[in-house]
Image: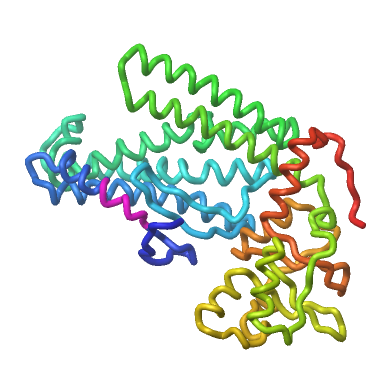
Amino acid sequence: MSWSLKLGRIFGIDIKVHLTFLLILIWGALNYGGSAGPLYGVVVTLALFSLVLLHELGHSLAAMGYGIPVKDITLLPIGGVARLERMPEKPLHELVVALAGPLVNVILAVVLLPVITVLAVLQGEAVTLGMLTQPGLLGLLAFLLTANISLAVFNMIPAFPLDGGRVLRATLGFFTDYQRATQAAVIVGRVLAVGLGLVAIYTGQIFLALIAVFIFFAGGQEGQAVAARGVLRRVRVAQALTPHAVALSPEATVGQVASLMMTNRQPDFPVLDPATGQLLGVASHRSVAQAMEQGRWRSRIADVMQQARHVPTIALTATLDEVQDKLAQTSSRVIAVYDGLHFRGLVSLEDVYRVFQFLSRSGSVGRIGWQAG
């Protein structure tokens, strides 16, 4: 995620903070400081987001337990985001991953309650809601107790993208397929969002209205993403290959390739061994432009290309959703397609999008049953 700074790694997961997080620290200093001053407000805010981080770590560790890599966790002013390389589609896996985050908050609340009670007794105070605004260790722990409860309850609202929406889909997934379960969960979430919106209008709560709008549109995006994935799962890689794609010789110069790129809309060019036809690397517009900026017009394209060993590969008979997953996992622009040991071409995310757009416009999504050629 752009505009993010890396803080470190936990369990092999990069922990990042978005630059806009500074805004929430300022807001926390002003709103949580009270009589103790802005510094105490910053401490309270950081403690609150430590709970958010632990919540996201709960999701991440559960996903990793099912073999799903986690790219990173980013803290934002509105909360935290754990980026999984793919979403679990088995109902049990999604259920466990979705529940893991709120479960962390429940466990923390259970641990904090007796600690707060003991501290209150030692200080001769009663456990009341007034503790929340009381500066000091007891007040901070009381605040974190209520924050854990709030995080667990809020995230279990059965609407995407909240954990409750994924729990609902996973539960429905035991009785129907993934796409139908998603559609049903989206409908439930949107009905709930409309209800929240009406309550917000009636009570004049602007923040609640914003939450309702966010849930309504985020649910729709989830439904569209799953529907798109369902379409891509029906199409083989062979159908996304560009026919008559131009290939380069490793001896071609940067200047020659640049001239070719000016008249050819092909975004990436395979560089092939003239004798065997096997892939040696990939020349992209970006790599050629960088070489030109460096004045390397006469350099061989083999010296500036992305080497084949760094290009992910996939079988000709794979589906486009597999292409999408692999490109996301490797952060690569293109993927090399092979029919056994023979190189057949390159496929990029642009190619995947082109096929999806064609199927969407033609209305032939439901009739696709292609096989790889």
Quadrant where the C terminus is found in the figure: bottom right
Q: Nearer the viewer, residue 239 or 107?
A: 239
For residue 84, above or below residue 248 = above
For residue 71, above or below residue 56 = below
Single out the residue that lies furthest toward the top.
202
Q: Residue at x 36, y 25 (%)?
A: 208
Question: Residue 110: x, y in percent?
Answer: 37, 41
Magenta stretch holds residue 19: yes
Q: How is the image coloured?
A: rainbow
Q: Is residue 302 left or right of residue 128?
A: right
Magenta stretch holds residue 289: no
Single out the residue that lies furthest toward the left.
35
Q: Residue at x 43, y 19 (%)?
A: 197
Image label count: 0
Q: Nearer the viewer, residue 271 or 109?
A: 271
Q: Residue at x 78, y 40 (%)?
A: 359
Q: Which residues are magenta?
A: 17-23
Q: Residue at x 63, y 55 (%)?
A: 66
Q: Is residue 56 left or right of residue 50?
A: right
Q: Is residue 8 left or right of residue 277?
A: left
Q: Nearer the viewer, residue 294 or 50?
A: 294
Question: Residue 53: x, y in percent?
Answer: 39, 52
Question: Residue 77: x, y in percent?
Answer: 33, 45
Question: Residue 245: x, y in percent?
Answer: 80, 65
